Amino acid sequence: MSVPLDIVTDLAHGGRWTSLRGAGREWLWRRTAPERDSVSPGDAFVDAGGLEECVPTVRGTPDHGDAWSRPWTREGAADVLHCDRFTLARTLRATADGAQADYVLTADAGFRFVWAAHALLDLSDHAALHTRDGARTRLFPEAAPLLERAWPDGAPWVEGRWPAPGGLRLDRFGPDDGTAVGAVVDASECCVHDDADRLSLTLEADGQPMSIALWRNLGGFPAPHPYRSTGVEPMLGRVFDLAQAGPGDAARVPASGEVRWRLTLTTTCRCA
């Protein structure tokens, strides 16, 4: 049954979503990270869980982007982030069957960026991720020891097909096994199944590359004190690190100076 989803955010600390809740279920995983309260732009990322707005990159520089370490403001109905090269506005609203987040990024024409709704979800060992079978999937170097074939020298990623690129099954989260893998799937919609609960995430953006990023950390990151964190991340772009983006791998601001997109979350799934 579809139900509204309530979103709670923390504008003072990067605009982070601290809660995504519906029908008594909290979907976002969180961890205690008091050092998050005193970060400055350019600091190494401090993982407090929830959903982070990662822009203009995820990996690379600045670590997890510019948004997470800066205060946002409320301007009318929108939450707004002002950075040196861009402004990002976000409008959240509950719907009858979930929630919607509408975004507008304003910058000079030609500005390239990656954006990800870096959602760390509170999932059981039985949870599964469903998206389009056969979708092109990029795996990144931390996956090298887990693949059926050797990693090509110097390659920033290798490609395979969902749900088992390179023989590595990614659609099941499973128990902790000491691994951590990042992947980017060529899809704009996915659905998480966790026992009887469902969370569907759908991205819409005209003329921009869209994907679903996966961070499946089953106690393999970070050293020396790893923990479990599972991320399902709708993304504009097809790479984690903007510096590695080739043609078509990053969003680009058109002549209008604006990029608009929508993230829709529901508690029912169209995916299998």
Image (spheres, rainbow, N blue to C red):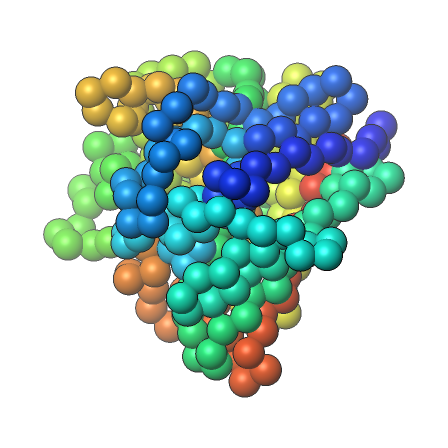
- Indicate left or right for 159 with 172 as reference: left
Q: Measuring from the top left, give residue 68's x and y in whole percent.
A: 44, 44
Position of residue 146 relative to residue 115, above or below, is: above
User: Looking at the rendering, which quadrant does residue 24 occupy?
Assistant: top right
Position of residue 259 relative to residue 71, above or below, is: below
Relative depth, front residue between 207 and 269 = 207
The residue lying at 59 percent from left, 82 percent from top is: 256
Position of residue 86 relative to residue 29, above or below, is: below
Q: Is residue 231 visible?
A: yes
The residue lying at 82 percent from left, 42 percent from top is: 95
Q: Measuring from the top left, give residue 15's x and y in whole percent.
A: 54, 43
Quarter of the picture holding the N terminus: top right
The residue lying at 86 percent from left, 39 percent from top is: 96
Q: Measuring from the top left, give residue 78's x and y in whole percent.
A: 68, 55
- Indicate left or right for 43 with 124 as reference: left
Relative depth, front residue between 233 and 33 = 33
